[in-house]
Each structure stands twice: as C-alpha cells, then as structure tokens.
Image (cartoon, rainbow, N blue to C red):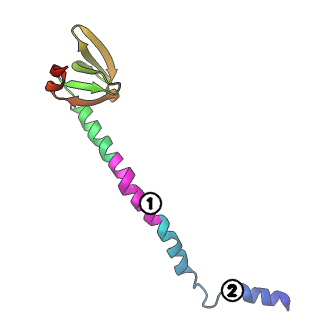
Amino acid sequence: MGIELAYAMGTQPGGSGGQGSQIWSFLPIIFIFVIFYFLLIRPQQKHKKEHQNLLSNLREGDNVLTSGGIYGRVTGIKDDKITVEISDKVRVKVNRGHIAGVIKQDVLKSN
C-alpha cells in the first residue's frame, strides 16, 4: 500500500499541467539572449562589416592609420600586403587587416 501511495503523490492532477510553467522558466533566458544580441553581437558585426568595406575600398595615395599607431600614406597594394610610406623614402609593409582606418590629409600635415 505504501508504494501505491508514492505513485499517487508523484503524479500531477490534470496530466500535463506543468508544460506552461516550463515555457515561463525559459523566458528569462530567451530575454537575456535577445538583449545580449542587440547590445553586443549586432554592433560588433556591424563594425566588422564597416571595417571590411574600408579595407576593400583602400587605394594608393590614401592616408592611413595602422593598428600600431603609425600614420602613413599607401604607396602600394598587393593582395594582403600594403606598402605604407611613413616618412620620406621610408616604407613599411603592413598586413591589410592591421589598417585601422583612413584618415584625412589635414592630420598628417599638422604633425
């Protein structure tokens, strides 16, 4: 008789009444993921896309800033290698991915 009582206590009345509560328990996790997507993932993807667009539109003569903080002018582009002139007759080769941005001509003249 004790075993039958344990089985009776383990079952819930109404069959699958707990299904609604399971959905409500996952709702905060889904909400956190949506916030995480809009605050972190989406802006990062947008920034990466803008940077890729900048690198694909890079031309000779553009003034650039490298990720190492070096200002220079692009004198040659070959695949992933970009030749940057940082001073008169001083040229360095930089990987395309290490170009942080294209800058205005005025910035180089003021220094």
Query: Where is the C terminus found, in terms of image quarters?
Result: top left
The answer to whether the residue labelled 1 contacts the one labelled 2, judged by CB atoms less than 8 Å apart, is: no
Q: Is residue 10 above or below residue 68?
A: below
Q: Is residue 65 above or below residue 13?
A: above
Q: Which disc number belongs to residue 76?
A: none
Spatial CA span between label 1 and label 2:
34 Å
Q: Residue furthest right?
A: 1
Residue 49 versus residue 36: which sits nearer the camera?
36
Which amino acid lies under the numbered mark 1 shown in the image of this protein? Answer: Phe
Q: Residue furthest top?
A: 89
Which amino acid lies under the numbered mark 2 shown in the image of this protein? Answer: Thr
Q: Crowding at label 1, few (<14), some or many (≥20) Cα neighbours within 10 Å?
A: few
Magenta range is 30-44
Q: Which disc number belongs to residue 11?
A: 2
Query: Where is the N terminus found, in terms of image quarters?
Result: bottom right
Q: Main secondary structure of the magenta part?
A: helix
Q: Crowding at label 2, few (<14), some or many (≥20) Cα neighbours within 10 Å?
A: few
Q: Secondary structure at mark 2?
A: loop
Which residue is depicted at the point 29% across and 37% down?
Answer: 52
Look at the image and say whether residue 111 sits in the magenta stretch: no
Residue 72 versus residue 74: which sits nearer the camera?
72
Please give the residue where the numbered disc 1 appears in the rendered image: 33
Look at the image and say whether residue 43 sits in the magenta stretch: yes
On the question of residue 61 being in view, the answer is no
